[in-house]
Image (tube, rainbow, N blue to C red):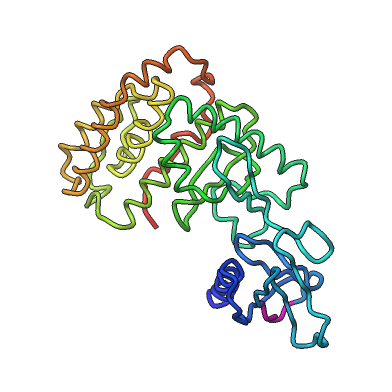
Amino acid sequence: MAEEDLGATVAAAAVRAGLDLPVPVAYRDGGLYLPTLGTVLLGGPGERGTAVVRATGDGFLVRRPEDAPGTELRIAPDEPEGPHWLPVHVLRRAPAPVLLLDDLDPLRDCFDAPATDRLEAEEADAWAHRVGEAWSLLADAVPGQAAEAALTLTTLTPLFTGEAEPGRHGPGALGVGPSAEANELALGLLSGFRRAKLRALGEVTDLYALDGTWEHRTPWGSEHVTFSRLLAETFERAGLGLYDPRFLTGVPEALDKIENAAEVTVDGKQLISAVRKEISGTRSAAEKNRGRSFPSSGRRTNVLASDQKVTFE
């Protein structure tokens, strides 16, 4: 499976770069998926095999061993959806960055909520409209975080339920549920981005040790949680609080708890110092947003919902 996925990734990179490089790619259930590009339909359910993908000056071609010369499939760069080609949806709605709405990746079901099936063009357009509206709110309320997210996020995977959550394959991808309101979606996108950012940091440095040895009470409730969860919720709340000031309640106290905990490492303390600067330097922004209309605090679905113990995979 890993070799098959690598072949598809190499082929997609070669096509995007315009490299005249033949790459064999395995296909399953009649579909040959090229990450960030789309799915070439070569047969029906249950059909599998290998085809060669090769970039051309005007797109790329796909040839199976049994194809006669001149009968290979040719896909143009902006080829619309058709009998042999399903392109990845691209969301283009300012002020949001250009994002892929990936409802094709056979491995996209890597979130807590199930991924949707293929969306119709009208549904993808509705997604673009909702994301554009939500991003407009973020750009107005938290321009710094919106700009950072715009440089980081590349892909949204539509989910049946929930708001937004990071995947397990990199900080640039989020799974997003069918949020109907712009405020709700803005909070969900910001929440997912903060969690993805912390997960990425945890993959390159040790922020804590001996997680689970002790439990800590959260300042925003009576629950006792592991250090990793306290850190994750605090980091998330600090970012959300700059959009909706209600989330800042208890954050300074939580930062003190984390900084004085036995589990925190030197790098973890550096992160806490950065978060302190983040919230202290933007209190004026939080005050500016205090008069804004936000979703009821009673409806948070998966914002700030996390496991009892947070791990970085």
> In the displayed structure, does residue 74 sit left or right of residue 180?
right
For the point 68% across and 51% down, the residue is 89
Q: Where is residue 229 in the image (x, y as percent from the top left)?
A: 34, 41
Residue 70 higher or lower than 207, as above or below: below
Q: Position of residue 242 (x, y in %)?
A: 38, 26
Q: Main secondary structure of the magenta part?
A: strand
Q: Give the range drawn in magenta.
A: 48-53
| Residue 49 on the magenta segment | yes
Residue 113 higher or lower than 58, as above or below: above
> In the displayed structure, does residue 34 sit left or right of residue 148?
right
Q: Where is residue 84 in the image (x, y as percent from the top left)?
A: 80, 66
Residue 93, image quadrant: top right
Can you say which quadrant of the picture contains the C terminus? bottom left
Q: Nearer the viewer, residue 213 or 25?
A: 25
Residue 136 higher or lower than 246, as above or below: below
Can you say which quadrant of the picture contains the N terminus? bottom right
* Residue placed furthest toward the top: 291
Q: Where is residue 227 in the image (x, y as percent from the top left)?
A: 27, 42
> In the displayed structure, does residue 122 sit left or right of residue 307?
right
| Residue 8 on the magenta segment | no
For the point 71% across and 64% down, the residue is 39
> In the displayed structure, does residue 107 sit left or right of residue 140?
right
Q: Which of 305 and 37 is in front in this view?
A: 37
Residue 77, image quadrant: bottom right
Residue 32, image quadrant: bottom right
For the point 19% across and 42% down, the residue is 269
